């Protein structure tokens, strides 16, 4: 296996995909810090809005590795890590390279931008996967170049673009992803399909999404709550797709405060939301696939169940696969 | 993500799994070379019998990285690489650590053993995933320790054991793996399922296995050749599982020289072979699963086809997943 810049960018991409769906309204971004002998020093990702950017996470982790000063690990806020690095970097980063899947931000708020921090720390080489098209935050590459940083852009451009696409979509419109859990034999029925880890991951996404779409039959059969109790998160608004508006209102999902529940026979309500998760199986897949941007499948390695996905003229491009707690987590898009 | 010794051993494991099924009668082994600052220098695996061991592949690759002397890259035989390293190492390895999924061999044949080479090269630290239980080659750890090498054994022991298990099985008995190709919806019918890369990978395994088992109905319907023409390899012996012995002998598989074809209603013939691949789908799976050691699934990300795996009371442990040319390649064993 060749250990080159693609290898490091791929590591950054894989780390970032672990948090896809959880960073809204921020992008999923990954970052590697690599030393002068091509030694891998840190791999981190942006985990959720309000948490530090991927570059800050990776620089924090790298600082500890390079200096053995564990004080930086006690810091959690971006501003604290920024300030610590600015005060105590002591040129420890001067020979490192930074790989980031997205152009470092130029946005100055409570903290200096990631781009200017990189300049101040004396980092000489930055590899960028995809350029930021967000007006407020873009321009990071220019800041770096003006400070004499060697910037190589568009490394693994296509993969980096796939990673950032949800962010670019919800900046302009709404991002819709279809989530399902299935077994290896394609079945989706007959009780719990996915692992405890996968279910917790789904709850974390429900906590972040602002609308959850589900089929009427599923509501009637499963009588779900559709909250995010496994991560102590919020219950998103619900759109039930159903021809009839009649539902037993004692079904738990109807009895949660501060949640709107819509019952419609179409997807028009989606226009009022930005980050939308559709949960379902084959019927909802058929109904919604033409408006879906990305597909997220939790694949459990067993062959129980009876029915599930039947023949669909659909081919996917796999964007990322990961394995957690036995299930395979697959992000996909339709093959173009 | 923590960059620690587990991280490096996992990289070695993942690289080794790419060649699982192809190394017979040798084990699948992976090896990482890591520098004094924890920099990753090389990741390589044993690729096939007759090729250099994983440690030699990794040391070759690392030598080039450390010295920039590309002469070593022109060498392909184990003895040449061994001799080159012995003559020209110039202590370039003295600060590196070596991670290997299997205890380095102590076997001295045409070349010195990997264990003694490691000692001569002055490597100070070796991490070993699983100890070699093969009498002829074991004892490598002792050789290392006697030379003052710091040996840490049983790092990711369970994963390393899963990787080496086919080798340990065929040393004592016969190793049987069940291979199938399916789509995301569990279907296995209706034409070609897997990608060109996956089909080539299967042919490489046919070239290496000594018996291929297949169902009578598949032979009648698909009229296959069951050779390994995509890799210019050999055609393995065939066992057709069928109640009747009547077959149209113009089916291509019957007309290949130097191949035995058996038609039986049982698996007794397997006792005469060591490395056995069963190809099939749900029916053959049901027939054979109790004698199968490992399961190998090529999963194509689309939902065409009509029928495939139905309900089976079988849970798997995923041993490794990889993605190549769109298909997911999954090695699994039955959950204990």
Image (spheres, coloured by chain):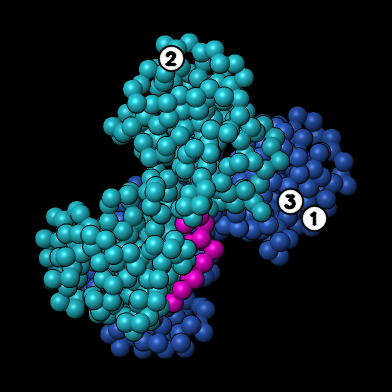
Chain colours: A cyan, B blue
Q: Which residue is mark 1?
A: B256
User: Residue B88's quadrant in the figure?
Assistant: bottom left
Q: Is residue B186 magenta?
A: no
Graded by Cα atoms within 10 Å as few (under 14), some (14 to 19) or many (20 or more), the crowding at tag 3 reads many
Of the numbered discs 1 and 3, the one sitting upstream in the chain is 3
The residue at 73%/55% (across/down) is: B227
Give the label on residue A251, or none: 2
Please tell me if label 1 and label 3 are on a single chain: yes
Left or right of B188? Residue A234 is left
Q: For the magenta stretch, what is the residue range?
A: A152-165
Work out how far the residue at label 1 is from the one at label 3, CA to CA, in angstroms. 10 Å
- Report in which chain the residue with disc 1 lies: B
Looking at the image, is A215 positioned above or below residue A247? below
At which x and y percent is residue B91? 27, 85
Label 3, on which residue?
A: B226
Within-10-Å neighbours for mark 2: few <14, some 14–19, many 20+: some
């Amino acid at each position: 296996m060749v250990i080159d810049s693609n290898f490091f960018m791929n590591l950054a991409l894989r780390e970032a995909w672990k948090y896809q769906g959880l960073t809204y309204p921020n992008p999923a971004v990954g970052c590697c810090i690599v030393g002068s002998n091509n030694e891998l020093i840190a791999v981190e990702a942006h985990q959720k809005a309000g948490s530090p950017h991927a570059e800050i996470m990776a620089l924090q982790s790298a600082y500890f590795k390079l200096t053995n000063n564990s004080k930086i690990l006690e810091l959690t806020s971006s501003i604290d890590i920024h300030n610590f690095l600015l005060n105590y970097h002591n040129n420890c980063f001067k020979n490192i390279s930074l790989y980031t899947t997205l152009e470092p931000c130029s946005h100055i708020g409570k903290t200096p931008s990631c781009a200017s921090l990189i300049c101040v720390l004396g980092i000489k080489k930055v590899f960028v996967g995809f350029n930021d098209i967000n007006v407020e935050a873009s321009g990071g590459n220019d800041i770096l170049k003006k400070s004499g940083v060697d910037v190589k852009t568009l490394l693994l451009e296509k993969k980096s673009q796939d990673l950032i696409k949800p962010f670019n979509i919800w900046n302009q419109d709404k991002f819709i992803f279809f989530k399902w859990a299935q077994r290896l034999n394609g079945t989706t029925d007959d009780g719990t399909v996915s692992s405890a880890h996968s279910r917790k991951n789904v709850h974390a996404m429900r906590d972040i999404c602002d609308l959850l779409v589900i089929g009427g039959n599923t509501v009637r059969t499963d009588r779900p709550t559709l909250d995010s109790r496994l991560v102590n998160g919020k219950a998103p608004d619900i759109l039930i797709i159903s021809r009839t508006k009649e539902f037993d209102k004692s079904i738990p999902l109807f009895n949660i405060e501060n949640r709107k529940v819509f019952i419609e026979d179409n997807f028009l309500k989606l226009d009022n939301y930005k980050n939308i998760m559709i949960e379902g199986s084959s019927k909802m897949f058929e109904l919604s696939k033409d408006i879906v941007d990305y597909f997220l499948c939790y694949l459990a390695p067993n062959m129980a169940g009876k029915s599930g996905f039947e023949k669909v003229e659909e081919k996917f491009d796999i964007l990322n696969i990961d394995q957690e707690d036995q299930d395979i987590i697959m992000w996909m898009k339709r093959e173009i």
